[in-house]
């Protein structure tokens, strides 16, 4: 039987990251930028890249993914904000979480009327929103 360990075939198999995401990940590692961060509007693709940044502990990538995702949040209409909060909490994307917390605090009544807010957001995030709301006056 042939030994096909990674050291023997000089190949590493990464099966939990798509080839597109890995290409963006490697581009970011070499250039501190990548296409999906410049022009991406696909939340799923950005979330997968954020997940890669989290998995491999690339803080700069996590920050940049959080910034790009924050640009896709409609704070005024509260569109997809719960989804973004959940993504931020899942991957420890502090920039994105803080952006969403401030957005909810500034649109508190509208956010509190949304059913998904109460069903899907972590209690610690609700507490952060309440603290942010209190600081606004």
Image: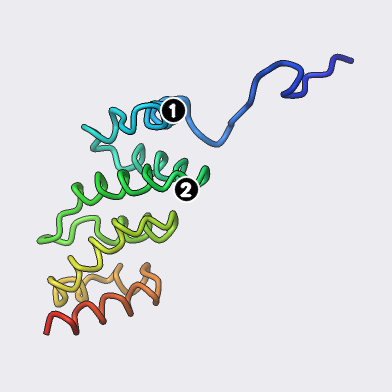
State the quadrant of the C terminus. Answer: bottom left
Disc number placed over residue 86 in the picture, else none: none
What residue does disc 2 label? 54
Question: Could you tell me which residue is drawn at 24 percent across and 62 percent down?
Answer: 100
Dot 1: few (<14), some (14–19), or many (≥20) neighbours within 10 Å? few
Disc 2 to disc 1, C-alpha distance = 14 Å
The image quarter in which residue 4 lies: top right
Q: Earlier in the sequence, mark 2 or mark 1?
A: 1
Q: Position of residue 120 (x, y in %)?
A: 37, 67
* Badge 2: residue crowd in 10 Å (few <14, some 14–19, many ≥20): some
Residue shown at 44% from the left, 54% from the top: 91
Measured as percent of width and height from the top left, residue 79 is found at: 19, 56
Q: How was this image coloured?
A: rainbow
Q: Which residue matches tag 1?
A: 26
Number of marks: 2
Q: Could you tell whether 45 is left or right of 137 in the image?
A: right
Vertical relation: 92 (above or below) 18: below
| Quarter of the rendering occupied by the N terminus | top right
Q: Residue at x 13, y 71 (%)?
A: 106
Give above or below for 111 relative to 12. Answer: below
Front residue of this view, candidates 17 and 52: 52
Q: Are marks 2 and 1 in contact (CB under 8 Å)?
A: no
């Amino acid at each position: 039987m042939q030994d096909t360990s990674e050291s023997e075939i000089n190949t590493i198999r990464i099966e939990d990251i798509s080839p597109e995401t890995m290409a963006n990940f490697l581009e970011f590692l070499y250039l501190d930028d990548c296409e999906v961060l410049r022009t991406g509007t696909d939340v799923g693709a950005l979330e997968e890249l954020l997940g890669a940044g989290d998995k491999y502990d690339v803080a700069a990538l996590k920050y940049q993914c959080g910034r790009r995702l924050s640009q896709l949040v409609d704070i005024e209409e509260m569109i997809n904000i719960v989804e973004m909060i959940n993504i931020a909490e899942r991957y420890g994307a502090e920039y994105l979480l803080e952006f969403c917390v401030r957005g909810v605090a500034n649109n508190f009544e509208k956010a509190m009327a949304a059913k998904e807010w109460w069903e899907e957001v972590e209690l610690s995030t609700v507490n952060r929103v309440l603290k942010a709301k209190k600081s606004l006056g």
